Amino acid sequence: MKRLTVSKTVIAGFLLLPLLLLTVILFRPDQAVSAIENRTLTTKDNLDTDILGGDFQNSLEQYLCDQFPLRGRVKQAETEGKLLLGMRESGGAYIGKEYRLFQKLPPAEIDKAACEKYARRVNRLAEKTGLPLYVMYVPSSGIALNDLLPEGAPMYDYEDLYAALSAQLPSAGMIELLPVLSGQAACYYATDHHWTALGAYRAYQAWCEAHGTKPSVSESDLMPVTHSFRGTLYSRVPSGKIPCDTISAPPLDTALVVEADGREIGLYDPAALKTKDKYNYFQGGNHGTMIVTNPHAASDKTLLLLKDSFANSLLPFLAKDYRKIVMLDERYAFAEPSELAQTVAADEIAVVREIVSVP
Amino acid sequence: MVFSSAVFLLAFLPIVLSVYYMIPVRLKNPMLLLASLIFYAWGEPVYVLIMLFSTVFDYGNGLMLEHLDRTGQPHRRKWVLALSVAVNLGLLGFFKYTDFLLGSLNALFGTGFVPLRLPLPIGISFYTFQTLSYTIDVYRREIPSQRGLVDFGMYVCLFPQLIAGPIVRYRDIASQIGVREIGADKACAGIFRFVQGLAKKVLLANSFGALWDEISAQDGERAALTAFLGAAAYMLQIYFDFSGYSDMAIGIGKMLGFDFPENFNYPYESRSVTEFWRRWHISLGTWFREYLYIPLGGSRRGFARQIRNLLIVWLLTGLWHGAGWQFAVWGLYFFALLVLEKRFLLRRLERLPAAVSHIYTLLAVLLSWVIFACDDLGNAWRYLLSLFGANGLANAASWYYFRAHALPLLIGAFLSVSAVKTLWRRFLYRRPVENHAFAVKTCVAAALYVVSLLAVINGGYNPFLYFRF
């Protein structure tokens, strides 16, 4: 071939390849969700229309990226490439030993002041209501399983944070979880930032010890419900090398009634096991307020529980012991906890959340 | 619109080029103007009006300057120039420096001016300098004025160099506006150049940038080794990002038939700061020399005047990069180094082994980037302290960063000097590769293009660094 013909071929390729891809994206039916990344995708139908403000332009860019053919494979390839270069993190997740994934939480990402502010608020709540308050701060998996992190990977200073928050909570009974979770790999998922049912069970044991009661469930009651869980961290670092997790849960107590934001739901949501985010098996995910009533409970007490998603897998244990548990996730509901405590006639207040999370 | 986006790569560029190649010559300039306006309005749907105003205004000034010459009123020409400079710099000053000025006044005198908080029109510093170069050159009678509004508009708004340079002076491409050679070989060379720039930006610069962002966000726990890795990462990020943009601009220029001036020439292999600035952002240095340093008298009126001129030029060069004191300090830092080099350092450096002068230059530039990249002077100061070991020399995190990033940083450093080009050529023009050099180049470019495109699609960290310029 003559040089000029070759040049023309290169130019044709450079123009036609992107145009071909563009055509495929535009005329192929849109994908609504990305299973691997665990998020909804931008489709033609939800493009923004504001051109002057620039939102249309941004959503179109997002649309082209989201609907690009084989997008999931590209993410996988990125992870493999980084591992090859010696990098042990990607997309905000550390890739630790045995390919366990950890949420990357270096000191700079922790808003200590906000955590302290929240702790003060909770303490005031206990003082105002005069009710007993228990606080369980869950250490992040990278703290509890520090040995499995990539060597030297920066994480926040748990001891320092825990001490600072405890100092803000003089009225609380602090139930420290690091001693029972530290080094227990089975207490955290390998592909998700949450704790496993076993981790939640260890916390439940600590809870019972602090309350001077006996656990109503034993460890051997935990039953696996799926072996193919790949959690939120996997979505950031998809790779064939990363194994699947098992989700377990204690058996269902059929007398339980669970009401979320005024609607009856199940303590477990088996439908979630068919989706990507299988952790939503626990009550179908987060809800603003959830009320759990158990007529067969070991006590007739009412517990007001201020929580994040870690509490969802702890709930099946606590539900055995309380007649009524009112769960408030302040990220999704704007109820004032002190008023809520009064309306539901709470006997006890508890906070269960990852130590670095603030509503 | 930025080059490293799906909209640009998948839609804008291939569509514009296809149409451009198909239409007759007389329609090419109007079509380029239209495409450039869409390109700019995509990201700045409102501020595109300012650019249009600048265009029409300086088009008029050029015509007026020539009209005054023709009608025998040359003494009035300086007023046209003064008006043009005042309005152009006035717009730039208003959008870019008002809040900086008010903030500084508030800090100094405790006044309570409320900042305007106007977003800066992207690329205003670039196109303002381009239109100024036009008016000044017409004033100096070095070039004739441009009669066609569309042709002039196309020059000012031309999308390849619009938002991140190089600063193309009108005289550099005046002859290409009317007639330019658009050929397959040139376009093909342009594609290779574009792909090279794209890969620099999305494969190298973005990943180094993510490391810098993480390390610069730390404070008390940042040991010297960590700080060094972070600064080195930024040093590579800004080079690959900026020179990558210039490569893409020059490459697209070639596809359209233009020859833009080069903007970077392996700056990190310089042996002095003086040499560094002859190799870094060449079009900006040229602009300041031509339109500020030399008119101020340059070095012709004694050392004291030269110092004053250098001081003005470098203070303004600093502030051109952003409205903030750290940029002023950054400019003055280079002023000090350049004066020292002129006075005695350069002569000494020449006598020293090359390694010493290379290390001196790299360290001097590394420190400058820390000042440049931090949000404010306080952060820059703390970063410099940590670089010099205020938080210890190394800790567990330092070694984590070292293990994860030493290899990519070394690869980056290697790719930032001309050795890679020399080796590549040696490989390409030796048998048996020689006979297939073009095929090899095409394959490498195709692979780089696809991987870069996938990196863009994949999302992740993809900043536009020149929003402050």
Image (spheres, rainbow, N blue to C red):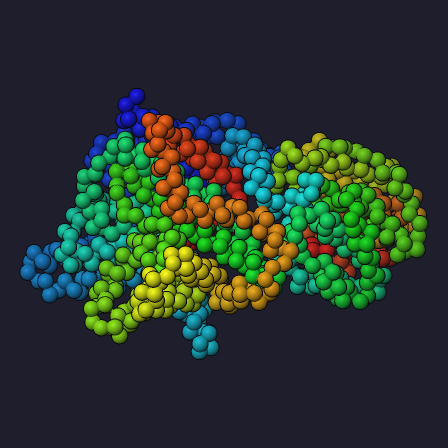
Residue B288 quadrant: bottom left
Residue at 81 percent across and 54 percent down: it is A179
Name the quadrant of the C terminus of chain A: bottom right
Residue at 40 percent across and 48 percent down: it is B417
Q: Is residue A313 visible?
A: no
Name the quadrant of the N terminus of chain A: top left
- In percent of width and height, residue B346 lies at 33, 64
- In percent of width and height, residue B219 lies at 58, 62
Give the left or right position of residue A116, taking residue A341 as reference: left
Work out whether residue B305 or residue A292 is closer to the camera in this orientation and state it: B305
Residue at 88 percent across and 56 percent down: it is A210
Residue B342 quadrant: bottom left
Residue at 32 percent across and 37 percent down: it is B190
Work out whether residue B419 or residue B79 is closer to the camera in this orientation and state it: B419
Residue A313 quadrant: top right
- In percent of width and height, residue B427 lies at 38, 35
Q: Is residue A343 above or below residue B443?
A: below
Give the left or right position of residue A249, taking residue A8 as reference: right
- In percent of width and height, residue B243 lies at 38, 48
